[in-house]
C-alpha cells in the first residue's frame, strides 16, 4: 500500500492559526467619493461644514420674529410688518427666529395678518440640523453604502481614505488552458483564479492574477517569490493535493515556512497555509467547490480580520427535505436549495461532489455542518446562508422525483416567469415520499401509461398519503436504449444498467424478460441500479453499460438508439391543495401553453394528447380499497 | 389662505401605475464573463462542452476493466495485467470502466495485484458529471454571482449577454453647486443625482448624469428632451415641490403627459411621474431622504419589473424601543437602528426629518409603515429591512439618554473595536425608561454630582427598576452658556432655553433662581424645553435663545461662553447583569483606557478623577426605603 500524505488540522484550529499568524497590513488608498461604495473607511470622516450652514425656511411663507406674534388668535389677528418672504430652502435672515406657513397668513396690503402666534424655531431648518461642521460622518471601519455617498457629497467630502489590500493569485497546473481557449480532453480552462479574483474584488481587494504556471517547481518558486513581494496575500491555485506533480507544499517550504497542509473540511481538505517573507500564502485545492470553501472560509475571514467587510451572510432556518449525512470530524459545507412550502422553509441539499460546480450555480444557499455532527435526519431544522436575495425563497419551486428533458423545458419557461426551479432526480419513490412529507412542491413521476387507477396503485399506497392531483405532462415511449441498437434478445450478451424498483422501466423490463423467457440472472448488470432513465442514458454514453431502459425523448436527446417496448405517463403530482399555489398555477398554465406543446413537439418522442389534463385522486375514496398493502420496498 | 398643490395618489396606486405604464425595454449587452458579476442573464446560457469531456480518474491508481476484477478477495488475489496507471484528473482510456486506488493495489513485477473486485464507474469522474455539452448553465433572469463565474469559465463561456438599461439623471436647481465646490450659505452641493447614479449602477444600470440645470423651464425642457432620447428612464432631481420655481411638472406636461404628481408617501410626497416619448420620467424630491424613498421604492421596483435583480432586502423582526407615530393615509419609510439586547432584537427608529441624511448613514435598516397604520406602541414587533450585513445586529450597542461630546469620543474608540454605537438623546428620563424596558444596552445620564444615593433617587424611583450599575465617565461643570457671557443676573433680560424636568440643569437652574430671588415667570423662555445640554447649545448658536444651562465641555466644543454654577456626574448606567456582556466590557475597558483619558483631557472641561469607577446600586436594598414615591412626572 502506498502512503497517503495529509495530517489534518481541525477547521477551527486552522482558522485560528491563519488569523493569529498574520496581523492586518493596514494598507490604505484614497478614492473619489463616487467610487467608494462597498469600501471600508480607515479613519473617521468629518463634515467639512455644517448642513445647513445657516437657518433655512422649511416651508414657503414668511420669516418673522416670534416675539412679534405673541397673542395672535382668531379673535385678535396681528398684522406683521417686519418680515421676509421665504420659500422652502431660502435663508432665514438672522433677525428672524420663526417661519409662518403661507397657508396661515392673510395678505393685508404690503403686510400679512396672522391669527396664531409663532414659536421660536417654528418651520425652520436650523443650521447644523443635518450635521455640524467637523462632526463625525463615518467612523473608522464603516462600510460605505450608496446612500452614504449622498451624505458624503452633501457634507463636502470629495475623496475617502479606504482600506485596500493586494492579493496575488497564481494558477498552477500543466493541464490548464486560459479563458477563451478550447481545452483538449484532459485539459481544463483555468477558472478558479478568475473566481477568486471576482470574489475577493467584491470585498475591496486589488487582485493580480499571474500567468498560468505549469507543474514545474522552479517556475512555481519564481512566481511565488515575486508574488509575495508584490502582495499582502498570495493564493496558489492547485498543486496542493499529494499527487506526484503537486509541488505547492515543497515550494512554500523552500521559500519560507509551512503552517499547515490539510484541514478537516469538506470540500477543501488539501487546503494549505504557508508564510513567505511574512506574507500569507494560501493553497487553493483544484476542485472548484473545494476552492470555493477555501475562498469563503479562509481567505474572506482573513480579510475580515484585516478590517474588510464580511461578505454578507444571510442566515435562514430551513427544514431539511432529505436526510443529510456528514463525516464526523469534518466541517462540511454543502450547497442547499431553499424554498418556501406552505408555512415552512424547506432546504434541499445538493450532492457533495467537489467537482460539480453546477451544484453551487443551482443552489441559493449553503450550510455548514460542524465537525462534531454526523448528519441530520430529514425534517431537521438547520441554518442555511443564502447566496441570493431572500426573495428567491418565495419564488422557488422544489421538484423531486424522476427528471426528463420535458421538465427541463418546463423549468426554462418557468424561469422566464421569474420562478426558480430546483429539480432533483432521486426517482419516483423518493419523489412521492418527499411529496407526502411536504418536502417538495411537486413530484414529477414516470408511471405506466393510461391506467391511472390500477397502475398507479403501488406508488400511492402509503397510508399517510394525502389527496393527490396528477398533472399530465406527456406520454412517452419506453424502450431499450443502446449505442448499437440492441433489442430484447441481445440483453443476455450485453452489459445492462437497471433502474430501481418502483420505476416503470424496471417493471416493464421484468415483464419483458418474463415474456421472452430470460432469467434476470442471465443479464449482466441487472443488479446495477441507477435512479432513472437519465442516469441509464448517461451510463451508456460513458461506456459503463451497453444497454438499459429509457424513454424515447431521452434517447433522442442523447443521440442513442432506441427500440420501443411500452409507454409511460410523465405526470407532475401535487397535493390537491397545492393547485391553489400561485407558483403551481403558473406551472399548470405553462404546461397548457402552445409554447410548451411546440417545444416538446419539436424535440420529438412525446405524445401530447393529454398534456395539461389534471386528474384528482382521492386516495381514501378511490384507491385504498383496491390495494393489497404497501408494495414498496424502499 | 394660499392654495396648496398636490392631489395625492396612494403609494400602491402610484407603484401600480408606474409598473403597468412602462413595459420592459429589453435592452441587452454582451459583457466579458469576468465583468458579469451582479448582472442578469437575458437568454439561457448553455455549456459549450461536457465537463469533464471524457471519463477521468477521481483517484490516483490504476484504470481497469471491472470484468477482469470479478472474484478478487483477500484469499484469492487477482493479478491485473491489462491496466493504465492514472493520477487524479488523468483521462481513463475508453477500454477501462473503473479505477482502483493506489492504496488498494500491490505491485507484482510490472503488474498489480488486487484483493477486492471493482464495480463499473468506481473512482471515475464520468464524462459530463459536472455538466453535459449544451445543457443549461444559467436560465434567463439569473443574477450572476462570483462563484457562477467560475462555472461559466469552466464550461467555455467567455461572454454573457446581460440586461442593461440607460438611466438619465438631470439635476435641477439654481441653488446647486457641483461636487468639489464650496457651497455659499443657501447653496447646496448637488448630491442626489450622485446618490442615484451609485445606487442604480449597483443594480446594473448605465447612468448618465447631465450637468446641473438652473431653475429655468426652457433649459430644463431642452435637457429633458435630450435625456428621453438617450435613455430608457429619466430621473429629474428636484423642482417637484410646488414652490414658485418648481418647473418639473410644467416641463413634463409641455413635452408629454403627467401621470401623477404627489404620492401619499413620507418622505417623498412630491414624487412625480410623467411620460415623454414613451420614456418614463420620475421626479425626485429635493430632500435627500425623500429622494432615497423615490429611488428605492419607485425607481428600483421599476427596474425590477424590467427584470433587474432587486436590491437585496433582508428582513428582520425587531421589537420597537420607543413608540413610533405615523400619519394615517401615508406609507412611511423610517430609518431604524437594529441591535440585539439579550434574546431580542431591538429597533430604534430615527427622527423623520427628510433633510437629515445622517439618519440613514447611522441606521442599519429601515421600516415601511403602511398607510393604514397610525403608528406602533413601544415594544411592538415590526419588520425592518437591513441596510448592512446581519452581523451588524450583533455588534451594535444602543445607548439612550443624554449625550455629551465625551460619549462621541467613546463611540469613536468603540467603533475602532468593531462595535457600532447608536446613541440617541431623548434625555435622562427616557434613557432610564429605555433601560428598564431592555430597550437599550446602557443609558448615558447626567446626574447631580457626587451624591449618589440621595441625588440619584428621583431617577431610579420606578417600582420596576432593576438593579443598576453606574459606570462613571466624567464629572463636568454645569453653568450658564451664552454667546455674550451672560450670568445669573442677566437671565430676566435674556431669551432663555430650558431643559426638561429630571435633568440636573433644570434642578440646578431652579435652585439658582430661588437663591437669587428670581421668579421663573420673569425668565422669557423658561417654558421652552429641549432635551438636554447639546440642544441648549444648538438653540443658542442658531439664534433661537440667548442663554441656557449646559456643561463646560459642550460650551467649549461649541465656542460659547460659560459661567460655572455647579457640577454633575456623567454616568453610563446599565442593568447589573449587562456588565457581563462582551460589548459592555469593551466599553468599560475603553473608558478606563489611557487613550480615553488623554482625549478628554485634551478637550478640556472634564474632571476625570473617578472615570471608570463602577458603582452598583441595588435599588431594593439601598434606595427604595428612602424614597417618598415616584417623583418623575413623565
Image (tube, coloured by chain):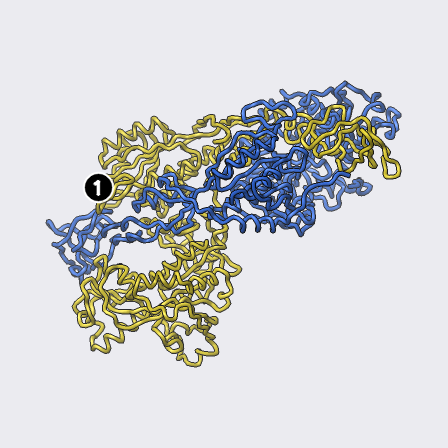
Chain colours: A yellow, B blue
Q: Is A155 situated left or right of B462 in this image?
A: left
Quadrant in which the N terminus of chain B is drawn: top right
Q: Residue furthest left?
A: B109
Q: Quadrant of residue B34?
A: top left
Q: Residue furthest top?
A: B485
Residue to which mark 1 is pinned: A244
Residue at image coords 22%, 72%:
A520
Q: Is B379 situated left or right of B283 in this image?
A: right
Quadrant in which the C terminus of chain B is drawn: top right
Expressed as whole percent of the image width and height from the top left, the position of residue B402 reads: 69, 33
Expressed as whole percent of the image width and height from the top left, the position of residue A374 reads: 40, 54
Expressed as whole percent of the image width and height from the top left, the position of residue A556 reads: 27, 62
Q: Is A325 situated left or right of B168 in this image?
A: left
**In the rendered view, would you say B125 is above or below B426?**
below
Total numbered labels: 1
Residue at image coords 74%, 25%:
B543
Amino acid at each position: 500500500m502506498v502512503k497517503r500524505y495529509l495530517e489534518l488540522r481541525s477547521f477551527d484550529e486552522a482558522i485560528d492559526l491563519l488569523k493569529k499568524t498574520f496581523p492586518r497590513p493596514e494598507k490604505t488608498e484614497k478614492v473619489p467619493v463616487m467610487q467608494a461604495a462597498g469600501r471600508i473607511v480607515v479613519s473617521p470622516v468629518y463634515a467639512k461644514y455644517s448642513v445647513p450652514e445657516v437657518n433655512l425656511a422649511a416651508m414657503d411663507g414668511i420669516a418673522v420674529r416670534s416675539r412679534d406674534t405673541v397673542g395672535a388668535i382668531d379673535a385678535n389677528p396681528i398684522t406683521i410688518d417686519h418680515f421676509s418672504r421665504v420659500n422652502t430652502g431660502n435663508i432665514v435672515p438672522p433677525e428672524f427666529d420663526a417661519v409662518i406657513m403661507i397657508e396661515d397668513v392673510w395678505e393685508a396690503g404690503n403686510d400679512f395678518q396672522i391669527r396664531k402666534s409663532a414659536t421660536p424655531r417654528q418651520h425652520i431648518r436650523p443650521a447644523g440640523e443635518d450635521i455640524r461642521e467637523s462632526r463625525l460622518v463615518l467612523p473608522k471601519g464603516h462600510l460605505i453604502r450608496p446612500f452614504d455617498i449622498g451624505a458624503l457629497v452633501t457634507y463636502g467630502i470629495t475623496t475617502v481614505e479606504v482600506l485596500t489590500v493586494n492579493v496575488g493569485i497564481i494558477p498552477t497546473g500543466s493541464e490548464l488552458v486560459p479563458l477563451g481557449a478550447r481545452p483538449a480532453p484532459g485539459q481544463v480552462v483555468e477558472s478558479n483564479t478568475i473566481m477568486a479574483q471576482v470574489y475577493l474584488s467584491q470585498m475591496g481587494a486589488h487582485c493580480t492574477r499571474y500567468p498560468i504556471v505549469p507543474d514545474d517547481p522552479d517556475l512555481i518558486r519564481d512566481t511565488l517569490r515575486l508574488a509575495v513581494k508584490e502582495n499582502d496575500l498570495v493564493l496558489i491555485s492547485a498543486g496542493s493535493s499529494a499527487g506526484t506533480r503537486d509541488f505547492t507544499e515543497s515550494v512554500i517550504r523552500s521559500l519560507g515556512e509551512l503552517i499547515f497542509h490539510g484541514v478537516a473540511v469538506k470540500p477543501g481538505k488539501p487546503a494549505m497555509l504557508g508564510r513567505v517573507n511574512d506574507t500569507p500564502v494560501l493553497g487553493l485545492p483544484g476542485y472548484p467547490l473545494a476552492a470555493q470553501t477555501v475562498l469563503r472560509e479562509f481567505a474572506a475571514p482573513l480579510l475580515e480580520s484585516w478590517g474588510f467587510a464580511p461578505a454578507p451572510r444571510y442566515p435562514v432556518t430551513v427544514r431539511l427535505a432529505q436526510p443529510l449525512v456528514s463525516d464526523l470530524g469534518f466541517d462540511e459545507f454543502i450547497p442547499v436549495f431553499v424554498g418556501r412550502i406552505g408555512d415552512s422553509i424547506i432546504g434541499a441539499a445538493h450532492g457533495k461532489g467537489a467537482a460539480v460546480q453546477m451544484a453551487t450555480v443551482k443552489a441559493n444557499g449553503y450550510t455548514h455542518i460542524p465537525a462534531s455532527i454526523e448528519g441530520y435526519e430529514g425534517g431537521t431544522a438547520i441554518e442555511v446562508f443564502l447566496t441570493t436575495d431572500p426573495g428567491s425563497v418565495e419564488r422557488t419551486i422544489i421538484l423531486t422525483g424522476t427528471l426528463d428533458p420535458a421538465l427541463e423545458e418546463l423549468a426554462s419557461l418557468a424561469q422566464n416567469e421569474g420562478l426558480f426551479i430546483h429539480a432533483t432526480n432521486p426517482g419516483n419513490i423518493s419523489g412521492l415520499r418527499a411529496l407526502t412529507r411536504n418536502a417538495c412542491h411537486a413530484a414529477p413521476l414516470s408511471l405506466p401509461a393510461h391506467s391511472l387507477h390500477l397502475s398507479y396503485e403501488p406508488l400511492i399506497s402509503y397510508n399517510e398519503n394525502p389527496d393527490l392531483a396528477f398533472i399530465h405532462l406527456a406520454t412517452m415511449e419506453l424502450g431499450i436504449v443502446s449505442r448499437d441498437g440492441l433489442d430484447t434478445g441481445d440483453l443476455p450478451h450485453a452489459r445492462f444498467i437497471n433502474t430501481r424498483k418502483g420505476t416503470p422501466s424496471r417493471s416493464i423490463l421484468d415483464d419483458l424478460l418474463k415474456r421472452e423467457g430470460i432469467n434476470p440472472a442471465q443479464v449482466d448488470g441487472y443488479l446495477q441500479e441507477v435512479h432513472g432513465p437519465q442516469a441509464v442514458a448517461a451510463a451508456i454514453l460513458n461506456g459503463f453499460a451497453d444497454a438499459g431502459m429509457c424513454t424515447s425523448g431521452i434517447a433522442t436527446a442523447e443521440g442513442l438508439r432506441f427500440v420501443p417496448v411500452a409507454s409511460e405517463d410523465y405526470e407532475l403530482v401535487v397535493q390537491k391543495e397545492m393547485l391553489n399555489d400561485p407558483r403551481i398555477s403558473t406551472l399548470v398554465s405553462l404546461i397548457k401553453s402552445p409554447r410548451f406543446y411546440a417545444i416538446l413537439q419539436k424535440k420529438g418522442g412525446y405524445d401530447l394528447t393529454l398534456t395539461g389534463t389534471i386528474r384528482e385522486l382521492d386516495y381514501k375514496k378511490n384507491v385504498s380499497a383496491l390495494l393489497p398493502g404497501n408494495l414498496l420496498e424502499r
